[in-house]
Amino acid sequence: MILCDIGNSFLHFYYRGRIWKESKDKLSQKDANEIIIFISVNEQSTQSLLHSHPRCFDLTPLLSIDTTYKGLGIDRIAACNAIKDGVIVDAGSAITIDIMQDGIHLGGYIMPGLAQYRKLFSAISVLDCDLNLAIDLDMFPQNTRDAVSFGTLKSIILMIKNTSKNKKIYFTGGDGKFLSRFFKDCIYDDLLIFKGMQNTIESKIINKGVTL
């Protein structure tokens, strides 16, 4: 059984302890005997997967979470299924923040990812510069590049800190490991979405004896 999280930029796979990503235009051949269980936020990439592998199963209809939030993305639902209490920060193309308490989703919000901040500033010619990810956030910037970098990172970090309060923070996603360095006693887990998928597979497929 191969798990697949289809995002806006890449398809992320998990199989026997290994994680890797592929683009929709360069999908590798998988063992035809292995079923790929997937979730997706990108229809074009989904079609690429379906055309490249004979056995695929969409887990989306089985994934759910106790929430009043309307339109919660399936990747966020999967991650929330992995955590009963805490703040989940998925830092990819966008940064999503979700708050879980006693297995209930209290709500969440979305911010641009680091690469998207960079694109936003590039629209203003004098601010078109690469981010300095090594900037000292305890010192006031003294040049434009550092000023842009400071504003980007500080806004993300302060929003997460203001949200988390005393809750444990769980980071995942491509920029999750980098952002986690600014927080004490947090957890970086690149398997978070896959763990949520596995929990659903166990509770709604395996334990009920469903055959795929």
Image (cartoon, grey):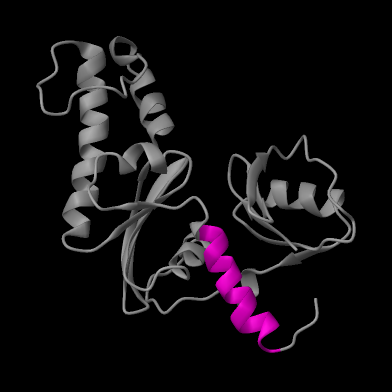
Residue 129 is a magenta residue: no
> Most prominent secondary structure in the magenta stretch?
helix
Residue 167 against residue 155 in the figure, above or below: below
**Image quarter hosting the C terminus:** bottom right
- Let me know if residue 190 appears in the view: yes
What span is colored magenta in the figure? 193-208
- Foreground of the two, 160 or 43: 160
Image point (53%, 67%), residue name:
196
Residue 195 is a magenta residue: yes
Image coordinates for residue 47, horizontal then vertical, percent: 77, 51
- Foreground of the two, 43 or 170: 170
Image point (46%, 76%), residue name:
65
Image coordinates for residue 190, horizontal then vertical, percent: 49, 50
- Foreground of the two, 153 or 32: 32
**Image quarter hosting the N terminus:** bottom right
**Is 145 positioned to the left or the right of 171 in the image?**
left
Picture quadrant where residue 183 is located:
top left
Image point (26%, 14%), residue name:
145
**Is 76 positioned to the left or the right of 120 in the image?**
right
Picture quadrant where residue 9 is located:
top right
Image point (46%, 42%), residue name:
92
Picture quadrant where residue 70 is located:
bottom left
